[in-house]
Each structure stands twice: as C-alpha cells, then as structure tokens.
Image: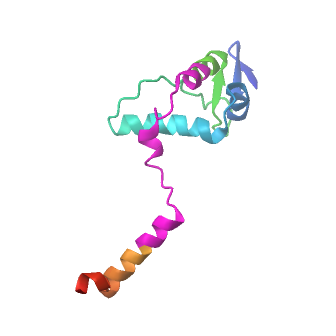
Amino acid sequence: MKFAEDKNWYKVGEVCQLVERSIPTINVWYDAEAYALENGIHFPFYLPKPRTDLDNRGSRYWNDEDVQKLKRFRDNLMRGDIAFYTRTLNRETEASKISKDKKNFREEHEVKEILDEL
C-alpha cells in the first residue's frame, strides 16, 4: 500500500485480498470491459480506472473508493454477465485441437471420408 495525495493506494494483490477474488479474475473483468468497448457491446458496469503513475514499474493502484466500487461490481455481477468475453478466450480443448488437426490433414492430403465415397 502507498499513501499519496491523502489517500491509500493498493496494488492489485492487495485489492484481490480486499475484494476476495484472484488476480486473473480482476484481469478478466477489465479485459471484458475493454473488449466490450472495442466491439460496441453494451457493458452496464463501471470499473474504476487504476492509476499507473505511482511507481516506475507502471503497477496498477486503486484507492479505498475504487475498492468499494470493485466490491459492488463483484456483488452485482450475475452468472453469464461477461460470457460475451469469456467465450472468446482462446481455450481450445484437446478434443477440439485433435478435430482441427484431423480436418487440416484431410484437406492437405485430399483425404475423403469412406462414407463420402459410398
């Protein structure tokens, strides 16, 4: 925690403890907001912008008021509210990778299914 401009400023790890969520979760919240803005998707929530000018490393800092806003966001977030973003994450399963590889192989080698020939 830093004290500047008569306010307490918390780094992301401290904010995570206060909000009771992990760093990846906080990152997904902010990434979803950015994705919504870039793609014209309505994002009905307000996430406070962290400060990055309090140290030389560009660390993100939030003050007490911002932490309260993040808690309200956490409490008002319903299951599926940011699904528009989480569905776009590149999380391929092994089965989908195998299926893709199989399809690419068939296309490259012009292999047809046995059923196609019957």
Q: Please, which residue is most extreme toward the top here?
A: 6
Asked if one can make out residue 27 in the rendered structure from this viewpoint, the answer is: yes
Counting labels gives 0
Task: Using the image, determine if residue 41 lies above or below residue 71.
Answer: below
Colouring method of the image: rainbow
Q: Quadrant of residue 60?
A: top right
Q: x%, y% of residue 49?
A: 54, 26
- Which range of residues does the magenta coloring cover? 71-100
Asked if one can make out residue 112 in the rendered structure from this viewpoint, the answer is: no
Q: Residue at x 58, y 28 (%)?
A: 50
Q: As drawn, is 75 to the left or to the right of 33?
A: right
Q: Quadrant of residue 10?
A: top right
Comparing 11 with 32, the one in front is: 32
Q: Residue at x 53, y 34 (%)?
A: 29
Q: x%, y% of residue 22?
A: 67, 37
Q: As drawn, is 34 to the left or to the right of 13?
A: left
Comparing 77 with 7, the one in front is: 77
Q: Residue at x 68, y 15 (%)?
A: 5
Quadrant, the C terminus: bottom left
- Taking the magenta stretch, the answer to whether it contains residue 99 is yes
Q: Residue at x 53, y 66 (%)?
A: 94
Q: Quadrant of residue 15?
A: top right
